[in-house]
Image (cartoon, rainbow, N blue to C red):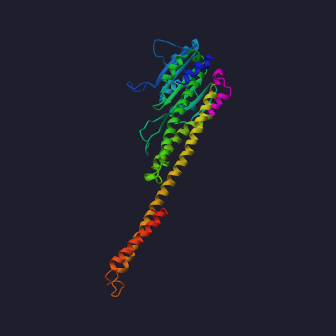
Amino acid sequence: MSMIRDLRAVVRPSSRISLRKDTSTSYDTTRDPATPSAVVDCAVYRDGARVESGKPLTPHEAMRLVRRDGGFVWIGLHEPTEAEFAGIATEFGLHPLAVEDAVQAHQRPKLERYDDSLFTVFKTIHYVEHDRLTATSEVVETGEVMCFTGRDFFITVRHGGQGSLRALRRRLQDDPELLAKGPSAVLHTIADHVVDGYIAVADAVQDDIDEVETEVFSPGRGGGVSRGVDSARIYQLKREVLEFKRAVAPLLRPMLLLSERPMRLVDPDIQKYFRDVADHVARVHEQVIGFDELLNSILQANLAQASVAQNEDMRKITAWAAIIAVPTMVCGVYGMNFEYMPELHWKYGYPSIMGVTVLLCLGIHRTLKRNGWL
């Protein structure tokens, strides 16, 4: 029971690289010295505790300590180049196809099993704060976290400005009992951390959709039919939801595999906790599908309201044209140059015609207004 509490406390707050097997381990030496290395952190963990070496370890040195004294090494990288990653891939015997995906990025979430390692890809989602949704608003930002899980190593490759794992590493280091479970515990913690981010973003996107929905269905000025909102805003929100969906939907099956299928690289005590992650992914996936369908309905309603508003405008224009047609007709008749016309020389002809014209116009106006045309 203590392990369960500890686990939840931690997780809730272009061309392929050549991997020739040789005796030397090369790392990138061409990077500008002023530019930080792609290796964010490299540490050895033994019995749930970080092994302090007194100096930063290289991946080669860390792996040598693990092979000599046991434990596992956790290496974190951020957007490595091919040259930077080639030596690490050779040192840990990573599969060339997985290495190619890790360097090139822009991969869909997936789980791939190789002989002695698991390769997992997660899409990280970050909600972009904005005062008001516009036709060009960015709602979500995506990044990637790729994980190589082995028997005695765990390697994370991160792409994008979001999704830093520093705080997560520190929380894990504060829980030796969980960290002692090995690389699979780290994999579960990262998976749960990413999916918890999905839940938070889904709640924020729901607020944006509610805002647009309220504007679309709110009464127009004077209590009339709303003229809707800019359709481009709805399209933009729909595009952002689609980006969200691309991150969530493919992840469901990998989480189900990790929770249901026994894997020798995943500790049995950790595997059952992947069910919770899979349940959360399924819930968010259902939410995102609902967002997409709701936005379709909102867009159709918005277009329908715009059409109704245009029809109302046309009816009003037609009604006023009918009213104006009466004096136009009278003026047209009495503007003809005939010598003999009724009432043309009559003393009361002008006021009589004007009075009849006004009465006809008022009668037509009253009739149209009663029928809802004005």
What residue appears at the point 40 percent right and 72 percent down from the top-left corner?
359
Q: Nearer the viewer, residue 51 or 98?
A: 51
The reply to whether the magenta stretch includes residue 152 is: no
- Estimate the x, y position of residue 67 in percent, counting from the top left: 58, 15
Q: Which residue is farthest bottom? A: 340
Q: Nearer the viewer, residue 52 or 21?
A: 52
Residue 152 seen in the figure:
no
The quarter of the rendered structure image containing the C terminus is bottom left
Depth check, front residue: 101 or 224: 224
Q: Residue 323 location in percent, x, y? A: 41, 69
Q: Residue at x 38, y 77 (%)?
A: 330
- Check residue 268 for magenta coloring: yes
Residue 346, quarter of picture: bottom left
Residue 313 percent location from the top left of the image: 44, 60
In terms of secondary structure, what is the magenta stretch mainly? helix
For the N terminus, which image quadrant?
top right
Residue at 50% of width from left, 48% of height from top? 217
Q: In the picture shown, does residue 304 fall above or below 256?
A: below
Location of residue 195 by image quarter: top right
Q: Which residues are magenta?
A: 253-272
